[in-house]
Image (cartoon, rainbow, N blue to C red):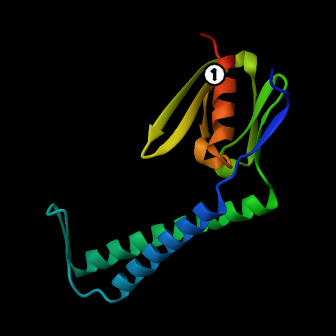
Amino acid sequence: MTELPRRFPYNPSWRVLLGCALFFGACAAFMAYKATHNSVGLIINRIITLGPTGATVFYWVIATLGGMFVLAVLLLAVRRVVGHRVLELGTDALLLPNGFLQIKISRIPYADIQGVSETQVSGQTFLYLRAGGRKFTITASLFPNTDSYAFVRDFLTSRAPR
């Protein structure tokens, strides 16, 4: 039998945060450069044709979106430093960080679990938990390793009705 409560770190890794910040920062910088040096139009997938002004606006919009992703990554990094998130398998309930920046903690009694399913999307694994008329998502990549995720998945699956 499993010794409860059991806590698992539940945060994006520093490597992922750094990679996202670099990727979206480079995209934002490149698109801002394109916007400031643009003098020609743009054709997107041979469907949408933009003149020079429209192309410049398009580049600025993409640059802004990239900058917003960088800001989101910085907020996640601050959240990780300030408040370390954990997923806890308690004696009678799961405590799951969720919501915007995972600031909120949901208490999900095991008795309320109605179903558990696992899905892979673009190489990412998600565990969906239906409980109390709500759907919760547990993201495998937020665990420190695959063994921790597998343990949580198997434990919660064992608590779901057959």
Residue at 81%, 20% (x, y): give it: 1
Which amino acid type is shown beneath numbered disc 1?
Thr
Q: Quadrant of the C terminus?
A: top right
Residue 79 point in image, percent of width and height: 73, 59
- Residue lying at the far left in this picture: please name it: 46
Tell me the SS state at disc 1.
Answer: helix
Residue at 46%, 67% (x, y): give it: 65
- Relative to residue 82, is residue 34 drawn left or right? left
Label 1 environment density (alpha carbons within 10 Å; few <14, some 14–19, many ≥20): some
Along the line of sight, the residue nearer the viewer: 23 or 132 = 23
Along the line of sight, the residue nearer the viewer: 98 or 85 = 85
The residue tagged 1 is: 157
Residue 50 point in image, percent of width and height: 21, 72
Residue at 69%, 18% (x, y): give it: 159
- Relative to residue 40, is residue 66 drawn left or right? right
Residue 37 point in image, percent of width and height: 32, 89
The quadrant in which residue 8 appears is top right
Q: From what the image shows, is residue 103 above or below residue 75?
A: above
The quadrant in which residue 114 appears is top right
- Residue lying at the far top in this picture: please name it: 162
Residue 38 point in image, percent of width and height: 29, 86
Along the line of sight, the residue nearer the viewer: 23 or 69 = 23
